[in-house]
Amino acid sequence: GQNIDQPTEMTATEGAIVQINCTYQTSGFNGLFWYQQHAGEAPTFLSYNVLDGLEEKGRFSSFLSRSKGYSYLLLKELQMKDSASYLCAVKGGRSNYQLIWGAGTKLIIKP
Amino acid sequence: SAVISQKPSRDICQRGTSLTIQCQVDSQVTMMFWYRQQPGQSLTLIATANQGSEATYESGFVIDKFPISRPNLTFSTLTVSNMSPEDSSIYLCSVSGTSGFTDTQYFGPGTRLTVL
């Protein structure tokens, strides 16, 4: 079957670093996406990994290990506006276009 | 990324009626998708809207309940038919195959539907 696991909720302090993990078991793999979704808004694209390793974009980095079926999103220098849900999605189901979505991790930032 | 708009942004409807949601993109895109998101839940794919042919529906979703049109490469509609309170949700369209990241899905702002 297709399965993506993420922690339901995490709490971190403003200015700190947080790592959100995602593990996946899918019938195929053609890339992994991270999206950010603020309450009441649509998801917005953060990062895409298709090869093993770390991709860095400013305060956000995403890591992928295909052999372990594992990814993480690293957020540095946390700001209050980073309070949101973070969704992990894998392209690798029965179609080349569809994404398999995790349930999302709600990140709460405290002052 | 493409600019995606949805109409209406929200609506309150009576049981048994139907609502059509429009999704408009400012550039031609390869793929268009329709999702549903219940409060506090992740995204559930309803169907892939295919240009010039019938949509491809996911398990649990049928054309009679969620008819979809895609007359061209920039526009699609989703109709929620014979609504019940269980249909209350946020409906999102997304697109991929825009210039740049061809695999990345970009989302419209969503339509918040409440069925009484």
Image (cartoon, rainbow, N blue to C red):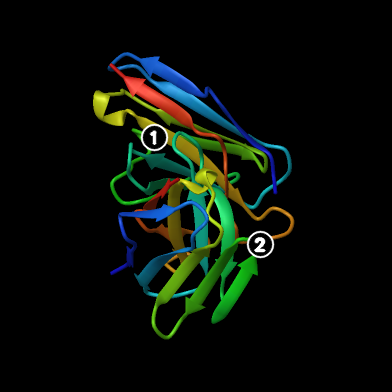
Nearer to the camera, A55 or A42: A55
Residue at the (37%, 58%) spot, across then down:
A102
Q: Which residue is mark 1?
A: B66
Check the picture and name the quadrant holding the N terminus of chain A: bottom left
Q: Secondary structure at mark 1?
A: loop
Q: Is residue B22 left or right of residue B26?
A: left
Q: Residues within 10 Å of mark 1 (few under 14, many from 20)?
A: many
Q: Is residue A84 left or right of residue A102?
A: right
Residue B41 position, x and y percent, is 33, 44
Check the picture and name the quadrant holding the C terminus of chain A: top left
Residue A46 position, x and y percent, is 58, 57
Residue B90 numbered tag? none
Task: Decide: is B68 above or below A62.
Answer: above
| Residue type at tag 1 | Phe
Is residue B67 visible in the rendered image? The answer is no
Label 2 – label 1 distance at C-alpha: 41 Å
Q: Is residue A105 left or right of residue B54?
A: left
Residue at the (25%, 24%) spot, across then down:
B85
Q: Secondary structure at mark 2?
A: loop
Residue B77 position, x and y percent, is 53, 32
Residue at the (44%, 55%) spot, across then down:
A87
Quadrant of the rendered structure where residue B15 is?
top left
| Residue type at tag 2 | Gly
Quadrant of the rendered structure where residue A89 is?
bottom left
Residue at the (36%, 15%) spot, across then down:
B13
Q: Residues within 10 Å of mark 2 (few under 14, many from 20)?
A: few
Quadrant of the rendered structure where residue B88 is?
top left
Q: Chain of mark 1?
A: B
Q: Which residue is mark 2?
A: A58
Q: How many marks?
A: 2
